[in-house]
C-alpha cells in the first residue's frame, strides 16, 4: 500500500537534494569565476612587480622545496625567443606566448599565462588551472557544508509539517469510522481544509444516499413483510379449514381457497424479486437496440389468454416499425407486461385494451397503453408508483407493485411516464423514451 506521507517526504527531499546539487554546481562555477578573476589579477601584479628587475644574466632557479610550495611559474624570454629565466626547471612549462592573458595546454594540464613586455624582454607568469579549480571546489564545499549538516534537521521538519498537513485526512478517516448504518450523520465541513473539502462533500453525499437507500430498504422489508403476512395468515386459516372439513365439498372449497392464497403469495414474491432485480442500483446489464413493435407483439402474445378469459379486445392499434429504443430487452418486457396485465385486470369483461407504438418529431419513441377500465383518481395518480400503494376504491387482490416496477424500469432507461384518464372512462399510460439513433448500434455490431 502506498503512503502519501512517504511519497511526499521522498519527493520533497529529492527536490531539495536536487536543488542543493544544482546550487552546489552554480556556487562552484560562480566561485571559479571569482577565483579566476582574482588569480588573473595576481598574475598581472606579479608580472608587473618584476619590471624593476635586471635580467642581464640568467637567474638561478628557486630551490625544489620552494618551487613545490609556489603555485606561480615565472619565465623570462629574450628578444630572440630564448628563455633566460625559469622558476620551475622540473616541470613542463608553457612556451613563449602573446602579450596579455593566455590559456595554454601542456602535457601536465592547462596553464593560465600573463605575458608583459619589459624593454626587449618578455616576462611570463603562469599558474596551473588545477590550482584554481581545487580552490574553487574547496570554497564551494565549505559554503555547502552547513546546508548538508542541516539536511537531517530539514528532513525531520518536513516530516513534521507533512504529518500536520495530512492530519485532516486522519481526522476524516476517524470521523468516517465512527459512522454506522444507524448513525449516518454528515461529516463536518467547517474545519476541513480547502483541498479536503471536495472529498468531505462527496462523502456526505454518499452518506446521504446510503441513508436514503437503507431507509428505503427498511421500508421495503417492512412493507413486504406486511404484504406477505395477510396471504400467509389466510393460507394457515384455509389449511385449518381443510383439516376440519366435514365433507368432500367443504374440503374441495377450502383447497381451492388455499390454492388461490398460494397463487397470490407466489405472485407477490415474484413481483418482489422482479422489483429487486430491476432496481437501478442493482442492475448492470448492457443496453442494446430494441424494437418496440417486436417487443409489444411478444408481450401481447403472452397476455392474450388472460384477455380472452375476460372477453377483452387486446391488440396493437398503431405500430411504427422504426420505433427503436436503447435499453435492456428483459427489463422493457417486464415494464410492458405489467402495463398490459394491469390494463387487462382492471378492464371489465367485454372491454378493450389498445397499445400504440409511435415516434415523435424528434424521432424519440413512446408506448401508450389505453384501456376502458375505471381509470385512476387524480388524487391517487401521484402515489400509484409507490411500492404497495393501492387506491381507496381498489378491490382487485393485487400486490401494489406493478406500477412501482414500471417506474423502476423506466427510471433505468431515462424514460418518463404520463397518466391520463380517458373520456368517458378508462386510463392511458404513456412511456416516453429518450431519443436514440438505432443506426449507431447497427454500425457497432457490423464493426465487431
Image (tube, rainbow, N blue to C red):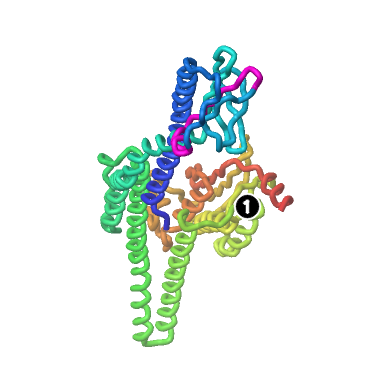
Q: Is residue 117 visible?
A: yes
x, y percent for residue 136:
44, 33
Numbered circles on residues, count? 1
**Along the line of sight, which residue is nearer the eye, 346 or 210?**
210
Tell me if residue 380 can be seen.
Answer: no
Secondary structure of the residue carrying numbered label 1: strand
Image position, residue 327 (x, y; %): 58, 51
Q: Is residue 285 magenta?
A: no
Image-based side of 45 in relation to 206, left or right: right
Query: Could you say which is closer to the camera, residue 399 or residue 204?
Result: 204
In the image, residue 378 sits, relative to residue 33, either above or below, namely below
Q: Residue at x 43, y 48 (%)?
A: 376
Q: Residue at x 45, y 61 (%)?
A: 276
Q: Quadrant for residue 38, please give it.
A: top left
The N terminus appears in which quarter of the rendering?
bottom left
* Residue 424, percent from left and from top: 49, 43
Horizontal relation, residue 141 to residue 342: left or right: left
Q: Which residue occupies the foreground of this view, 100 or 255?
A: 100
Please state the extent of the stretch shown in magenta in the rendering.
64-81
On the image, numbered disc 1 is attached to which residue? 288
Residue 263 higher or lower than 189, as above or below: below
Residue 389 figure quarter: bottom left
Residue 47: x and y, percent?
49, 20
Instruction: Using the image as rendered, state which of residue 74 and residue 209 is in the foreground.
Output: 74
Indicate whether 361 appears above or below 410: above
Q: Quadrant of residue 254?
A: bottom left
Q: Residues within 10 Å of mark 1 (few under 14, many from 20)?
A: some
Which residue is drawn at the image coordinates 34% and 61% (left, top)?
223
Q: Residue furthest top?
A: 119
- At 51% from the left edge and 36% from the top edge, which residue is drawn? 130
Task: Point out the residue furthest to the front here.
Answer: 57
Q: Is residue 265 above or below residue 55?
A: below
Amino acid at each position: 500500500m502506498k503512503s502519501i506521507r512517504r511519497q511526499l517526504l521522498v519527493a520533497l527531499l529529492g527536490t531539495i537534494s536536487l536543488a542543493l546539487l544544482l546550487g552546489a554546481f552554480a556556487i562552484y562555477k560562480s566561485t571559479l569565476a571569482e577565483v579566476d578573476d582574482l588569480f588573473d589579477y595576481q598574475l598581472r601584479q606579479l608580472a608587473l612587480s618584476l619590471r624593476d628587475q635586471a635580467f642581464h644574466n640568467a637567474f638561478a632557479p628557486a630551490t625544489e622545496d620552494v618551487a613545490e610550495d609556489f603555485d606561480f611559474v615565472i619565465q623570462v624570454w629574450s628578444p630572440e625567443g630564448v628563455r633566460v629565466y625559469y622558476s620551475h626547471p622540473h616541470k613542463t612549462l608553457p612556451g613563449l606566448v602573446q602579450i596579455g592573458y593566455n590559456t595554454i595546454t601542456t602535457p601536465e594540464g592547462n596553464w593560465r599565462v600573463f605575458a608583459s613586455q619589459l624593454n626587449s624582454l618578455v616576462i611570463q607568469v603562469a599558474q596551473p588551472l588545477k590550482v584554481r579549480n581545487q580552490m574553487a571546489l574547496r570554497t564551494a564545499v565549505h559554503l555547502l557544508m552547513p546546508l548538508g549538516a542541516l539536511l537531517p534537521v530539514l528532513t525531520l521538519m518536513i516530516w513534521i509539517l507533512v504529518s500536520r498537513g495530512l492530519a485532516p485526512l486522519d481526522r476524516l478517516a476517524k470521523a468516517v469510522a465512527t459512522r454506522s448504518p444507524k448513525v449516518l450523520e454528515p461529516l463536518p465541513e467547517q474545519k476541513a481544509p480547502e483541498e479536503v473539502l471536495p472529498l468531505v462533500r462527496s462523502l456526505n453525499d454518499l452518506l446521504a444516499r446510503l441513508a436514503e437507500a437503507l431507509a428505503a430498504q427498511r421500508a421495503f422489508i417492512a412493507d413486504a413483510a406486511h404484504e406477505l403476512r395477510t396471504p400467509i395468515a389466510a393460507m394457515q386459516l384455509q389449511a385449518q379449514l381443510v383439516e376440519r372439513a366435514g365433507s368432500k365439498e367443504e374440503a374441495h372449497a377450502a383447497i381451492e381457497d388455499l390454492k388461490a392464497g398460494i397463487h397470490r403469495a407466489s405472485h407477490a414474491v415474484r413481483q418482489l424479486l422482479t422489483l429487486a432485480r430491476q432496481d437501478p442500483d442493482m442492475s448492470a446489464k448492457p443496453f442494446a437496440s430494441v424494437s418496440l413493435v417486436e417487443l409489444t407483439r411478444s408481450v401481447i402474445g403472452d397476455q392474450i389468454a388472460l384477455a380472452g378469459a375476460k372477453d377483452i379486445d387486446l391488440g396493437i392499434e398503431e405500430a411504427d416499425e422504426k420505433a427503436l429504443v436503447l435499453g435492456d430487452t428483459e427489463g422493457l418486457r417486464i415494464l410492458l407486461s405489467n402495463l398490459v396485465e394491469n390494463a387487462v385486470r382492471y378492464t371489465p369483461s367485454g372491454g378493450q385494451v389498445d397499445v400504440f407504438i409511435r415516434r415523435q418529431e424528434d424521432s424519440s419513441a413512446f408506448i401508450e397503453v389505453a384501456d376502458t377500465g375505471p381509470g385512476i383518481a387524480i388524487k391517487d395518480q401521484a402515489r400509484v408508483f409507490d411500492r404497495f400503494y393501492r387506491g381507496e376504491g381498489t378491490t382487485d387482490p393485487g400486490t401494489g407493485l406493478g406500477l412501482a416496477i414500471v417506474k423502476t424500469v423506466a427510471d433505468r432507461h431515462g424514460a418518463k411516464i404520463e397518466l391520463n384518464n380517458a373520456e368517458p372512462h378508462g386510463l392511458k399510460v404513456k412511456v416516453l423514451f429518450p431519443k436514440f439513433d438505432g443506426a449507431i448500434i447497427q454500425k457497432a455490431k457490423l464493426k465487431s
